[in-house]
Amino acid sequence: MNKAKPLPAYLLQRYHGWKATGYADNQSWYRRLAAEGQRPRAMVISCCDSRVHVTSIFGADQGEFFIHRNIANLVPPYQPDGDHHGTSAAVEYAVRVLKVAHLIVLGHSNCGGVQGCIDMCQGKAPELEAKDSFVGRWMDILRPKYEAVADIKDANDQLRQLEKHAVMISLENLMTFPWIDELVQAGDLSLHGLWTDIGEGGLEYYSPETKMFQSV
């Protein structure tokens, strides 16, 4: 039985407000997007966290970014096993169909998913260790990187460093996709790792040369 309910009143009010202003003022642009399809120049893989507002950070309009969000902005390694792979499917569509020029992985401060990984590694989250925990099994992607931060005593610094490792392991895993590796080697696709500080509004980028994050 379908148990779906009507939208909450505040969402309906916001929709009608947008339709009367944002849409009405840009109606021709929206119709053009609908008729001509999307041609984003970049794909952004970011966290599901509601505090991460990708389009606001870069001042982007509709149609500029192909955005995929998941827990802790992780990309799994290439695994063509016939199973369900939402993130890999999104990457495939962006690269092979939309032919984006840039793949951006955007991490952020105070990430709950990364904290969950730390808690698992420290034996503090038995619920995430359970085989039926979707979050726990997803965070297993990042788990091997915990060793790199295990000796950091300050909990906030440890979290921040593992958040950045989440970006780095996603970049590493992207390169295991043969068609991404081919395009990168040919100079037709570029990979970028970013990390944003939600509270301070800061943005850092990963430098492959120094293997460190630097402020923009």
Image: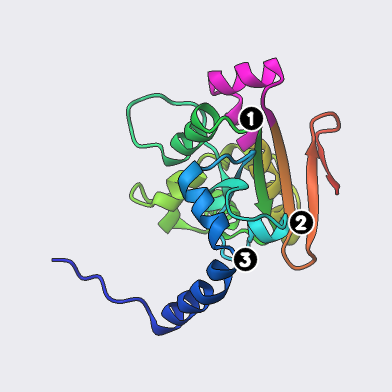
Cα gap from disc 1 to disc 2, whole angstroms: 23 Å
The circle on residue 146 is none
- Asked if residue 173 lies in the magenta stretch, the reply is yes
The circle on residue 51 is 3
Question: Badges 1 and 2: C-beta atoms under 8 Å apart?
Answer: no
First in sequence: mark 1 or mark 2?
A: 2
Name the residue that disc number 2 marks: 157
Q: Nearer the viewer, mark 1 or mark 3?
A: 3
Cα gap from disc 1 to disc 3, whole angstroms: 26 Å
Say which element carries label 1: helix
- Asked if residue 36 lies in the magenta stretch, the reply is no
Name the residue that disc number 1 marks: 172
Cα gap from disc 2 to disc 3, whole angstroms: 20 Å
First in sequence: mark 1 or mark 3?
A: 3
Residue at coordinates 68% horizontally, 37% vertically from top-left?
Answer: 168
The answer to which of 96 and 136 lies nearer the viewer is 96
Say which element carries label 3: loop
Q: Nearer the viewer, mark 2 or mark 3?
A: 3
Say which element carries label 2: helix
Magenta region: 170-190
